[in-house]
């Protein structure tokens, strides 16, 4: 089984990733004894994912992938976007971020939004990118106890439940991260034949 480091400390992300990539020996940052905080200084998901993956690759020398993802709200001109995790400032707080989005769109008639995930994979010293997008609508108030981040207010197109109400299996089939991870897994599985 091939080793692959997940360049994240976000336990929600790690849980989703482990569920999707069961054919790989997935190592966490704790498994490789990496304890530093990796800055995400860029204005694009691609650049932030790449800096995280490169940092961990340079530290460990192991195959690694990192994702950067966020929610892009039409009524907020694409915000919070790459700033989704810190939208309400430091320290990161999912509930404060969610409440600030709700406050900022309370008078908006357009409730459309999309989640975007970009994965940067460094595999055998080569760099690859994979992207996933999931479109949907934002509610006025949170619903559901699953997921993390903005999941309690995001209803994906074609569904009447929020990401926080859907099972992890269904969420992983349709989510931005699920789509990007499936593309990466297909690439890796094809390359290992």
Image: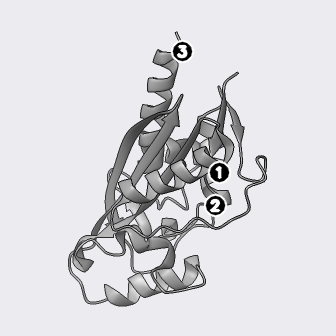
Q: Position of residue 97 (x, y in %)?
A: 49, 81
Residue 68 shown left or right of residue 168 in the figure: left
Viewer-proximal residue among 25 and 166: 25
Q: Nearer the viewer, residue 159 or 81?
A: 81
Q: Quadrant of residue 154?
A: bottom left
Earlier sequence position, callout 2 versus callout 3: 2
Secondary structure of the residue carrying tag 2 is loop
Q: Are marks 2 and 1 in contact (CB under 8 Å)?
A: yes
Above-or-below relation of 12 to 66 = below
Picture quarter with the N terminus: top right
In this rendering, position of residue 22 left or right of residue 153: right
Other residues around mark 1 within 10 Å, as few (<14) / some (14–19) / many (≥20): some
The residue labelled by disc 1 is 14
**Residue at image mark 2:** 10
Q: Is residue 94 left or right of residue 109?
A: right
Q: In x, y percent, where is residue 14? A: 65, 51
Q: Secondary structure at mark 1?
A: helix
Question: Of discs 3 and 1, which sits in the foreground?
Answer: 3
Distance between the alpha carbons at the discs numbered 2 and 1: 6 Å
Q: Secondary structure at mark 3?
A: loop
Residue 74 x %, y %: 23, 71
Lower sequence index among marks 3 and 1? 1
Give the label, 2 or 3, closer to the camera: 3
Q: Residue at x 61, y 34 (%)?
A: 21
Residue 28 appears in the picture as rendered: yes
Indicate the position of residue 68 as horizontal and vertical percent values.
46, 57
Q: CA distance from mark 3 to mark 1?
A: 23 Å
Residue 182 disc label:
none
Residue at which label 3 appears: 192
Q: How is the image coloured?
A: one colour
Q: Which residue is farthest top? A: 193
Q: Is residue 175 visible?
A: no
């Amino acid at each position: 089984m091939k080793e692959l480091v997940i360049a994240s400390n976000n336990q929600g992300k790690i849980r989703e990733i482990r569920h999707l990539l069961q054919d790989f020996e997935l190592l966490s940052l704790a498994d490789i004894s990496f304890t530093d905080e990796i800055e995400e200084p860029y204005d694009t998901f691609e650049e932030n994912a790449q800096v995280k993956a490169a940092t961990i690759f340079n530290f460990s020398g192991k195959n690694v992938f990192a994702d950067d993802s966020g929610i892009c709200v039409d009524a907020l001109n694409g915000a919070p976007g790459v700033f989704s995790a810190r939208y309400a400032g430091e320290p990161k707080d999912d509930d404060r971020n969610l409440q600030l989005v709700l406050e900022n769109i309370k008078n908006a008639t357009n409730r459309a939004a999309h989640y975007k995930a970009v994965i940067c994979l460094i595999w055998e010293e080569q760099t690859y990118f994979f992207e996933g997008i999931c479109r949907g609508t934002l509610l006025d108030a949170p619903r559901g106890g699953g997921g993390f981040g903005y999941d309690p207010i995001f209803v994906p197109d074609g569904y009447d439940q929020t990401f926080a109400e859907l099972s992890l299996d269904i969420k992983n089939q349709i989510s931005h991260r699920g789509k990007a991870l499936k593309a990466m897994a297909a690439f890796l599985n094809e390359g290992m034949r």
